[in-house]
Image: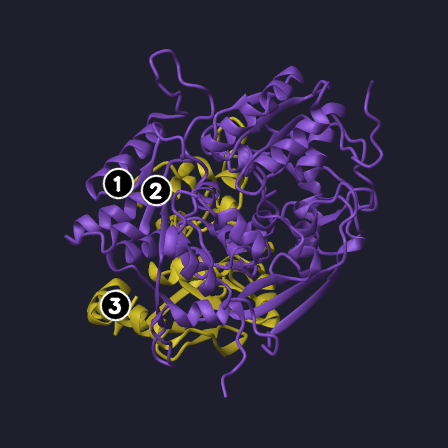
Chain colours: A purple, B yellow
Amino acid sequence: MTTAKTLFDKVWEAHCVQPESDDFPAILYIDLHLLHEVTSPQAFAELERRNLSVHSVKNCLATIDHSTPTSAPNAAGERDYITAQAKNQVDTFLENCKKHNIECHAWDSDQRGIVHVMGPEIGATQPGKTIVCGDSHTSTHGAFGALAFGIGTTEVGHVLATQCLLQRKAKSMRINIEGDLQDSVTAKDVILHVISTIGVNGGTGYVLEYAGSAVRAMDMEARMTMCNMSIECGARAGMIAPDEITVEYLKGRPHSPQGEDWDVAISNWSQLPTDEAAVFDKEVHIDASKITPTITYGTHPGMAFAIDASIPTTNDESDISSLEYMQFSQGESILGKDIDLVFIGSCTNSRISDLRLAAKIMQDQQVQVRTLVVAGSELIKLQAEAEGLDKIFKAAGAEWREPGCSMCLGMNGDIGKPGDLVVSTSNRNFIGRQGKDVRTILASPIVAASCAITGKITDPRTQEKAA
Amino acid sequence: MSNNILNSKTFNLITDNIDTDQIIPAQFLTTTTREGLAAGAFYNLRFDDEGKERLEHVFKNFDATETAILVGGNNFGCGSSREHAPWSLLDLGFKVVVSTQFADIFRNNSIKNGLLPIEVDKAALDYLSANPETQIDIDIANTSCDIQGYGKIEFPLDEFSKYCLSNNYDQLDYLISQKDKITAYEQQL
């Protein structure tokens, strides 16, 4: 008799070079190692110090996204880096990739983009793969039924040198989301609702699987938004079983299997979904029909609520100091509060469907505050321009910038001023993340675009479009 | 054997959800080395909007030779995978972090750099919160620590991590020693 297995079990077991024991962690084989400029230089230096080479170049895929400016290059093609050190970091990375023959999508590639946008877009992210990157939002790739998680720089070195990682298997949690979503509710609202339900550390020690009719109904971009934010409740990985929607998305992409390999791949992928009798360490049930547009009001993503709700009262010291930082009071609604800046972008919400949603709301409108729109990749930028979305954004007075991580973490200089209240489609509202003393409200592209054209925290369901 | 014993006093920074952006803000991540990150550690706590050191801040009289054990609140190290977080804490002089729960990636990164994460229960954290600069004597080999005035407690640490920390054993050396198995795995793919 075979034991019933979860999607996570299946991918984990297929990649154990050596299973774990009491004394030793498992040796887990990694199929795809994504690399970017920020978390890799010390790992390449370590390889050099030990006189090691890259074990399997074909499993590596690189791009530049974090330290890169989102302003257009000048006439001479020069980029306006925030510091010489930022430029040096990118240059060092490009040299490392060249030296080790790693496929790298840099300024000259139309496949360059935020690493978690690029991987799926070019078909490198596939069901059943193990995928790592020195970036916590690697969880994004779990949307395809891959086991994908963020690692530190020392581990980047381990994977470069051996294509393997030492890992203890996490526990499993299934998040069942059943029902139909209301109008103006997106995957972003769903995941913020999930995080506020299980708590900012509710997923620590677990790999999540998102299941249920609401998840099955989502397209791949929505599923990526869900899995992207798994780390915001502490789960290193979030997964969604592959299905027809996954297969359809991957068909014909440059790194997707071709010809006979494609048929074999589809057959293998169909074996991956969790067996009916499989048991999870924990199950959570969520009613999708009750979820409304959801935003954050505090300084971690677990402090999220329905946009028209009042801030809950609390005796928790951390929550109280969080509200002080946000300059909000217990019991108040934040609808109608003046905002200073809107950011539409990041590996959470910078894909073409996100930009279409924002453009639909900004069409024939004027933004009332500075609004940055940053596509997740060069391909998305080209697609958006082909559809005329850039013209809508520019006509509304928003900035249409070059692809990259941009204001999500602000390390390239795209940040707010001290005290600014920012509505952002990114994933973290941490203290100081988008600039010193900047206050961040996480929201969907629909909510962010609605706020941009009113200059206030706005419920998209009640907003009347100006003639 | 000296790696097995750590004795120092605690330094309290007890807020829940101290994320890696607070530990080391992103503007310090453009470096290509792992040295010198103390300059950016808890930068926004230590410096004002103009970049001047605040008149008063929690690290003003910090002396790592006296207090090398950082006590944080629940869910310490949540957020980004940046290893710059433990690097910067080590560069400040910390050798140990105590919390009721660590974020997984931060915990992994810390162990790989010799920064010992000690997970305690809420009662122990409450005691440490009420008693700043408490002496703790840590015995890694026995995964136990003696909190002065509170008592001796055990903390979770898997066998392999314990072995690596106690013996300064490098995890990459271990992986490289298993290359035959890795090659065999690749051949059956």
Q: Which residue type does callout 1 highlight?
A: Cys
Residue B106 position within the rendered picture, expressed as x and y whole percent measured from the top left: 45, 57
Residue at 71% x, 43% y is A295
* Residue closer to the observer: B102 or A249: A249
Crowding at mark 3 (Cα within 10 Å: few <14, some 14-19, many 20+): many
Q: Which residue is label 3 attached to?
A: B182
Q: Which residue is label 1 attached to?
A: A97
Pick out the residue farthest to the front. A260
The CA distance from mark 2 to mark 1 is 8 Å
Q: Quick one: SS at disc 3?
A: helix
Examine the rendered structure and indicate whether residue A243 appears above or below residue B183: above
Whether pointer 2 and pointer 1 mark residues with C-beta atoms closer than 8 Å, the reply is yes
Instruction: Give a yes or no on whether discs 2 and 3 share a subunit.
Output: no
Check residue A62 in the rendering and tell me which mark sits there, or answer none: 2
Residue A60 position within the rendered picture, expressed as x and y whole percent measured from the top left: 31, 49
Q: Is residue A345 left or right of residue B80?
A: right
Q: Hey, which quadrant is residue A350 in on the image?
A: top right
Q: Which residue type does callout 3 highlight?
A: Ile
Examine the rendered structure and indicate whether residue A374 appears above or below residue A192: above
* Residue closer to the observer: A407 or A315: A407
Residue A301 position within the rendered picture, expressed as x and y whole percent measured from the top left: 64, 49
Examine the rendered structure and indicate whether residue A149 appears above or below residue A353: below
